[in-house]
Amino acid sequence: MQSRANKSYQDVIVSVLEASATRREAKGYLQKYASKQPISSDLPRTSTKDSEAATAKEDRPEPVNVAVVKLRLPQQLSSDALSGTAKTLSQLRLLGLLALVVVDCGLDADRRTFDDEAFRICEAIDSFGGAGAKLAGHVFVKSHSNGTSPVASKFCGDMLVEDLGMLHRALQRGMIVVIPSLTRKDGISSPTPAEGNETTIALAKFLSGLQLDDTNGDLIDGVPVYRRPTRTASVERIIILDQVGGIPMAFRPDISHRFINLEQEYGDLIASLKTAECTSRVANVKNHIANLSLAKDALSFLPPTSSALITSPHAAANTQTSASSTLPIHALGYPLFGFDNMVTTRKRKNPLLHNLLTDRPAFSPSLPLQRIQEERRACVQNAESGSATLVKRGMPVTVYPDPKVQRWLPPEPSSPRLRLTDNCIDLPRLIHLIEDSFNRKLDAQHYLERVNENLAGIIIAGEYEGCAILTWEHPERIDEQAVYDSGRFVPYLDKFAVLKNRQGSSGVADIVFNSMVQDCFPNGNLPFGSDKMDFKSFGKNLSDFGAQITPFASRTFQLTKEQFGQAEEKTQLPPDYIDLVKKVDALKQTHQKMLAVTSHYSNEAYDYPPNIKETFQDLGRTVSEKVSLLSSATTTAEAQAALVAPPSARLQPKTFSHAVARASLASSQLLHQNHTGAGEDQLATALEKYAIAMERVGEIRLAQDSRIQSSFLAGWNTTLNTNLNFATRARKNVERSRLSLDAVKAHAKGTTFKLGGHGDSRPEQQDEQELSPEAQEEIEKAEDEFVTQTEEAVIVMKNVLNSPEPLRNLYELIAAQIEYHKKASEVLSELAPIVDGLQTEQEASYRKSREEGL
């Protein structure tokens, strides 16, 4: 049973990743949701009485990711629509997001209607297996605040959740919780219908650990002291399922918004929904306002990463509504910007599943409206049929010049105009944003000279997290005044930048783009180098681009299936090839280990003692130069001057031998200066000769290092960074061709995945079917490519393994070390008899002084 559940879990992930997510979005989803094991449905169940009597003090694991779903008027939904919605909620559970469904039948409905619809939803969810649904009644309590609470009303509302651990245990068992929007005044009163928005907000606060009231506080000296509530779950989504659908656009009330940035758009949207034009053309405006207000209120206390999704139950179920809910294009009375023949999307995306995987709306806000036509029908997805509006707290947007005050129009030549160097723009932060986004250095001076005199405006998202810079362009060799008089200035998008850490699902790019096309150029004059964007060509370009990335997408999907253990067939590589791969990997590791140590020969001071401190004057001249100067000195002052003589052109090497030489010479001179007897100080003389010898040894070591760098390190680095890289590249080509071959085979045999496991239940019949000539030809081409890449990789790897260069380079390393030790030995061998003679003289002098003393 557990293995079957895991397989179903993997089927859903692989299927939806194939249909929706990009690599970045898939990675983000897998890190947040799919990294955890599927929630087990095999935990022991306890009775309802025991569950409600248990205390909330038990050990709680990490909060699960949940979505609070408000389902409005489920009694008006057909069985198919309700079943489809339940199926989607079950799929969300498999994808790592548990739902708590608030059943809102309206204030006019009686208690029996609430109970019947709640049971109906539970039965629909249970029909899809898994952990099933949990009906949680008597959850909401209506309190009566006396107005003396010192806690902000944001966290202290009249609607509260009264739970004794039942919700927590149900979520830990992976159950979808269904809660009727009924409230009680106390423990003995009968439940009555409650406003759905209030109960949804109360539930989200309770799950987030933000519910504060008199019931979880103590009185100390008559003053209530509140205990911190326990966080039951991580509320990732607020999902509003209302038959009115997404929030309609002001200038096209029949089309819904795809993305709303509350920080920027909330006030204007509410005002536009209340206009006479909108109320006359859109039914249920009050419901739209209530839904948008619910999203705003909920997101105000949830984490910034949380979002709200407003859509219809039919969109959640991925089912068609009645024919009356969609309007053909010709019935709208005006064309959609004149693009009647656009190629439409192939599949109707489920907005809930797509949003979970990508944290984006099902259709990009920057996509032309006609691109989201419903499949096989010449009608737009309007606000009631199947659209969805993604709402995020977002960020403020600053626009210069402000389009609400001044329209974006070409300025008259020689008139005052906006420049990037104006005080209203933080130029250093803007430059940092552009450089970070494009990952290259910006020639700021050149850029300012190019755009400052023809700047149209700038859009800044948040704290310089994203921007769009637009300019006014005109044909060359035409006078600017003539261009202005003839109205031939064209808006052009010069820069569109988003900080790297804000790229992806954060919505910064959508926020900037929406502001550009809705606020700055609301009439469809999109700034892409022409007065109107050629969406037909744009659609064709998208198709061409899709054709180019199809091989990559198929390989990525095949690799994903293999990682999830879903691939039925995997082409095996030849044993000889695998053996060569192991040998090449061993050779690569050998080079890396050796170079990690021998690369120190490139560092002159690898044996320089770290505990000594030599001055600039100490390193100024060689020992030989100092000895020459000292030999010509006749007084102590001249000798001291020779030691501190001005440095030569190059500082002396910092090696151990050179350091010993400098220390020996300094010690020798110190003994000479303090010698008062007849003749020379033998130790001082020996140290001077030792200093000269050690300097020669140091120079021999430097010669050894230079030879090793040119004859060994250069050769091994070339092998590692060039030859072995060629082998690595060839192996990658083999892996790509293998994945492509397996993907072609799987496609030809019809091996794919379907949501909910509705694939072909007779795979053995598929294997028996003969492949079409076209499919067979495609497989043969992929096999030929795989064989070709494998043969080329074998040749490259054999060339790397059979190359004599590594051995030749190793011999040079050994030869350099032999030469160093040989020459160093010769130098020290010449010095040893001299020091021995001085030692003999010193010993004779010492004995003579002893005898004379006696």
Image: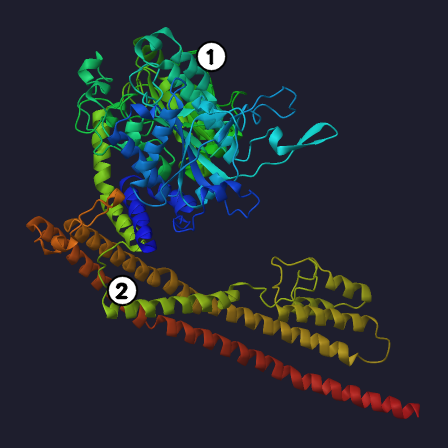
Q: Nearer the viewer, residue 444 or 470?
A: 470
Q: Residue at x 34, y 54 (%)?
A: 2
In the rendered image, the quadrant that contains the N terminus is bottom left
How was the colour assigned to the protein in this rendering?
A: rainbow
Mark in front: 2 vs 1: 2
Residue 377 in picture, x, y percent from top left:
17, 25
Task: Measure how far apart labels 2 and 1 are at the Cα level.
Answer: 65 Å
Residue 578 in picture, x, y percent from top left:
28, 67
In the rendered image, the quadrant that contains the C terminus is bottom right
Q: Residue at x 51, y 63 (%)?
A: 602
10 Å neighbourhood of mark 1: few (<14), some, or many (≥20)?
few
Q: Amino acid at mark 2?
A: Val
Q: Mark 2 — residue?
A: 796
Name which quarter of the figure residue 346 lies in: top left
Name which quarter of the figure residue 532 lies in: top left
Q: Is residue 764 above or below residue 663?
A: above
Residue 677 in picture, x, y percent from top left:
86, 79
Q: Is residue 146 above or below residue 646?
A: above
Q: Helix or strand or loop: what does disc 2 sit on?
A: helix
Q: Nearer the viewer, residue 370 or 52?
A: 52
Q: Amino acid at mark 1?
A: Pro
> Image check: 578 left or right of 236?
left
Q: Tell me whether circle 2 and circle 1 mark residues in contact (CB < 8 Å).
A: no
Residue 388 in picture, x, y percent from top left:
33, 27
Q: Mark 1 — residue?
A: 416
10 Å neighbourhood of mark 2: few (<14), some, or many (≥20)?
some
